[in-house]
Amino acid sequence: MRSDCRSALVLTEDAAKGCFQKGRFRKGFSRSVLLAASACLALSAASPASAQSFLDRLFNPDYQPKERLEPVAPAAPQPRQLDRSTIAANKVTGPKYYTYRADGLETVPLGALATLKTAAAEVSQTATQTSGQTAGQVPSQSAAPTLSAFDQARPALVDLSVKALPEVGAALKAHYRDAHDFVWVTDGAPNSRAQSVAAELAAADRYGLDPADYAVPLPVVAGLEAEAAARALMTYEMRLSVAVLTYALDAGRGRVDPNRISGYHDLPRRKVALDGVLPSLLSASDPAAALRALQPASPAFAALVAERARLKTLDDQGPEIRIAAGTLIKPGQSSPELKNVVSAIRHRASPALEARHIATLGTYSDSPVFSPELVALVKDYQAEAGLNADGIIGPGTIRALTGDSLEARIAKVELALEQIRWLPEDLGDRRVFINQPSFTAVYYEPGKAPLSMRTVIGTKATQTSVFYDEIETVEYNPFWGVPRSILVNQKLDILAKDPGYFDRAGFEVTNAAGKRLSSSDVDWVAVAQGRVNVNVRQRPGDDNALGELKILFPNKHAIYMHDTPSRHLFTKDVRAFSSGCVRLADPRAMAAAVLGTDVAHVAGRINTGKNNSEAVTARIPVYLVYFTAWPQDDGTIAYYDDVYERDPFIQRALEATARARTGIRT
């Protein structure tokens, strides 16, 4: 309406001026002009000043218009400037470590097992029903069934209960609901089967378990009345079965649920079939061997068990070996500390390494000269310890030689015996095994030598998670999609100083609809606060953070294996520098291995210069694990620093489990 009135006013003004100029401003026309002007002024809600200006222009022949000012367009909103407080307030935090909550015990009432629900009970019921028949009726002359010793003792279960883990309680009731025989009692006393199994349970620490979890006192029946003796024997029977079933559960899946340790642990808890445990022990010719067979059967587990046994035979104190701080010895140099290095190697080395260098250890034990023989010894030890085998005695080698006491090494082995139970029994013939503390990735395939290479893993603030998955894709010349955690925690500091950084550094910024945006036009404050979503990715190229390729096994942690332009980091002994993903020292070789092809094929796909991908058709699991003690390919155990300090959390979880199991132990 206002625009129409403005047009009418302009026409009215022009007409009026024409009439004045020609001297023919008639009375009727004047009235029409005034009416039109008044109506339009009213409808346009013009200000008094504007109305007066209009009338002056209309009726004042001496009116001189003032310079008209063009309206100024509002300035485009400028992105708000980032500041350190905004960035700090919106940092993306990683997973947390928890206060461990152990599996709880439940009270398992056994009264329902006191009644025998079998054919014998039906015969008894039939006999009772025929007792009221007349003299002319002749009852069946079937003999009363003979009850087993266990069935005769069932009434002792009427008010009996035990403490057990839920899975154990369910298996216990399922077995004895249909059983007719004692497993552990014969002729009113513990049998040889019970004695054999009890001895095996008492030695559970050989496998990293706690014998206190499975200890059951012998029943005392001497001098008891028949009913009390039956109750004592039945209590022993039930408690020893609980101990055996608990042992089977612990052997199969471990005592700890890893996912309750931290948000970095993502391992499905293994299912253990308990229904066949008691029947198998009942029929076994060697019950102790049958119980041992419940332990993991992998060569790695066997090597850890053997290492624990070996360590237990060593002097508990061991020699105190000191190597002067700041020691650095290169091949050909002399140093008074060299004899301490040789002594430490003798103390720390595996039996196999010691056997290979027995002559050198004897001949050069006091030599101050770093001779070729001693260089070979040091290199062999460095390789065994997972270090860079460069023959230079520096901080990393000295730390490995003086770090773990005998007690600490035993603790690491025992933790490894627990953790190995968190993994599948069958790891797969073809697999990739990434042990984070060793900073290595190893590809295994039957009939081929393992392909081992150095890795770079996450920093302590951006730790690599513990999980396993299956490899699906190799992507060449990849884009790097910047995760929100990296965008907020690392890139916003750069953008605060240089909003156009992404535009010049080979990154693409798009909104939720996929529209390209200029880095300098984005409201990064809103992005930091989570109110605006943008996608940022780095184009393929020499500077791309993922290098030439990445190997994908999609997971909720957004972790994968990839190349890197930062090749110098692979020369370091401690290689925790990434944002959580696993960087590979030889990504082309790993890609060729999982694809079942050769490096030339991989190079050809990279040399196209284009982003492209290739599916991994074989089933190849990848394990990202965390062992501070782990067997090498020759079976010897290597020890590693606890780079993320996770071992104490596992130890506290085991201690919490021991406290929660007090009910089993009493």
Image (spheres, rainbow, N blue to C red):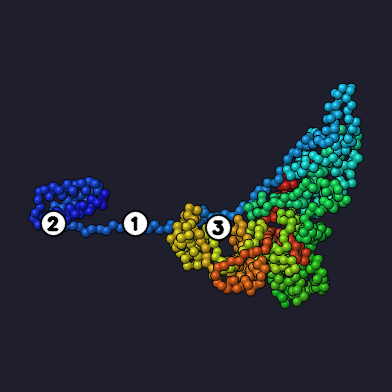
3D distance between C-alphas at marks 1 and 3: 36 Å
- Which residue has dot 1 on it? 74
Please tell me whether mark 3 sits on a helix, a strand or a loop.
Answer: helix
Which numbered circle lies on residue 485? Answer: 3
Front residue of 181 and 341: 181
The x, y position of residue 298, in whole percent, is: 77, 59
What residue occupies the far left of the structure in this picture?
23
3D distance between C-alphas at marks 1 and 2: 38 Å
- Tell us which disc is closer to us: 3 or 2: 2
Q: Quadrant of the C terminus?
A: top right
Residue in view at x 78 percent, y 49 percent: 248
The x, y position of residue 547, in whole percent, is: 58, 68
- Can residue 128 be seen from the camera position used here? yes
- Can residue 415 be seen from the camera position used here? no
3D distance between C-alphas at marks 3 and 2: 73 Å
Q: What's under tag 3, amino acid-wise?
A: Ser
The answer to which quarter of the image holds residue 20 is bottom left
Q: What's under tag 1, amino acid-wise?
A: Pro
Q: Would residue 420 appear left or right of 501 to someone viewing this image?
A: right
Which numbered circle lies on residue 18? Answer: 2
Residue in view at x 85 percent, y 51 percent: 288
Residues packed near mark 1 inside 10 Å, few (<14), some (14 to 19) or many (20 plus): few
